[in-house]
Image: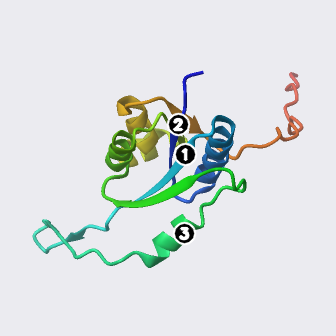
Amino acid sequence: MFPMRKILHPTDFSDQSKAAFEVACALARDYGAELIVVHVNRPTPIFAPDGIAVGVPVEEPYELRGQLAAVRPADPRVSVEHHLLDGNPADEILKAAKLKGADLIVMGTHGATGLARLLMGSVAEHVLRKAPCPVLTVKGPVGPPSEPEASATASPHRR
């Protein structure tokens, strides 16, 4: 495995991000790496009557800062720093990875497909394509595999 000194973990506070955070913490602990946790605040666009986006003064996001500060590793040996960024999530994650010299990005993915992915795009996909370092995506909560559900498929009767 390559040396890991800095691991970047972007979070949107979702269950997928929490699962990725657990993986990032385990890797940071095992490799003695610094964990950098970022959240990107996408300002809500406000449009003038003619449809042109208008810049709005950014208020201090106290609630987001509190949520971000609460993202803490269970293991006190893991060194963590937090950054609240503003802008397009994928672009800001890529900038942070370059600026901080990240050796690995560990992020959750919502696994959107079809029309939802087409309309909203995929932050994880954009980061995967343009990241300056390897990217590990985590699709869902990490844990023991669940019991397989009983299959209700029966062979059809032919008459």
Q: Is residue 102 left or right of residue 143?
A: left
**Tag 1 or tag 2, which sits nearer the N-term?**
2
> Label 1 is placed on what type of residue?
Glu
Drawn side of residue 34 relative to residue 102, left or right: right
Q: What's the distance in space between the residues labelled 2 and 1, CA to CA?
A: 6 Å
SS label for mark 1: strand
Q: Earlier in the sequence, mark 1 or mark 3?
A: 1
Query: Tag 3: residue type?
Result: Gln
How many numbered discs, if any?
Answer: 3
Say which of marks 3 and 2 sits in front: 2
Q: Residue at x 88, y 29 (%)?
A: 154
Circle 1 sits on which residue? 34
Q: Is residue 158 visible to us here?
A: yes
Do the CB atoms of the residues marked 2 and 1 lie less than 8 Å apart? yes
Q: Nearer the viewer, residue 148 or 101?
A: 101
In the rendered image, which residue does mark 2 sit on? 5
Determine the secondary structure under disc 2. loop
- The Cα atoms of the two marked residues, 3 and 2, are separated by 25 Å
Which residue in the rendered view is the most extreme toward the left? 50
For disc 3, the neighbor class at 10 Å (few under 14, some 14 to 19, many from 20) is few
Tell me where residue 85 sits by quadrant. Answer: bottom left
> Would residue 108 be visible to someone looking at this image?
no
Q: Give the Cα separation between the discs numbered 1 and 3.
A: 20 Å
Amino acid at dot 2: Arg
Crowd tier of the residue under label 1, counting other residues whose Cα lies within 10 Å: few below 14, some 14–19, many 20 or above: many
Q: Which residue is mark 3?
A: 67
Q: Residue at 55% across / 23% down in the picture? A: 2
Name the colour scheme: rainbow
